[in-house]
Amino acid sequence: MKPIHKILAAIIACLMALPSISQAQCKDFSEKEVMPMLGEYIVSGRYNTLKLREGEEILIFKTLSKGINYRIIVKCVDSLATNLHFTITDWEDNTIYDNGSQGFVWDYKSEKTQRIKINVFVPKTSEQPPLKEGCMTVITGIKPDL
């Protein structure tokens, strides 16, 4: 194998590894920073964690079951935290929760089985690069019946 091919193969291998390194950092953030915020709630299955950059938006769909107490946490790294905005709406787009002045933890007892949408948005603080980016996690916990 020619030296140039070895270099190209090494570069390609490094580029392919970057997303998994990024995901590992976000998973670590979720487990150390966010999961403890669940307190007495337990994780209700999978949680969403990814890197977000200023100006990006994500939409997550969840089903809530009647009579269950939920805690939904949307948290990101400190560099994005002051800008993070999220809303929770029902299927007809009626706002159930807006974190504007209420924080990043929402406790809710579902009165009916329903599908919700969690819309997370990080506004741009500047049009000039570099844009801030960092890990963001959405975790849903349920309160066990005691």
Image: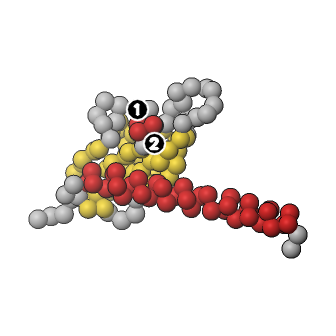
| Residue type for callout 1 | Thr
Q: Which comes before the other along the chain, label 2 or label 1?
A: 1
Where 3 sits versus 48, above or below? below
**Secondary structure under the numbered disc 1 in the rendered image:** loop
**Distance in Å between CA atoms under marks 2 and 1:** 13 Å
Q: Position of residue 63 (x, y in %)?
A: 36, 58
Q: Quadrant of residue 80?
A: top left
Dot 2: element: strand
Which residue occupies the extreme right position in the image?
2
Query: Residue at 63% across / 26% down in the picture?
Result: 128
Side of 67 relative to 136 (left or right)? left
Residue 31 is labelled as none
Q: Residue at x 41, y 53 (%)?
A: 29
Q: From this view, report whether residue 31 is shown above or below residue 123.
A: below
Name which residue type carries label 2.
Val
Question: In the rendered view of the protein, which quadrant contains the N terminus?
Answer: bottom right
Residue 132 percent coordinates (x, y)? 54, 36
Residue 19: x percent and y percent? 59, 58
Front residue of 5/42: it is: 5
Relative depth, front residue between 103 and 91: 103
Image quarter for residue 55? top right
- The residue at the far left in this view is 146
- Residue matched to label 2: 120
Residue placed farthest to the front in the image? 3
Residue 14 horizontal side relative to residue 32, left or right: right
Outermost residue on the bottom side: it is: 1
Q: Which residue is mark 1?
A: 82
Q: Nearer the viewer, mark 2 or mark 1?
A: 1
Q: Viewer-proximal residue, 44 or 26?
A: 26
x and y percentages locating residue 26 in the rendered image? 46, 54
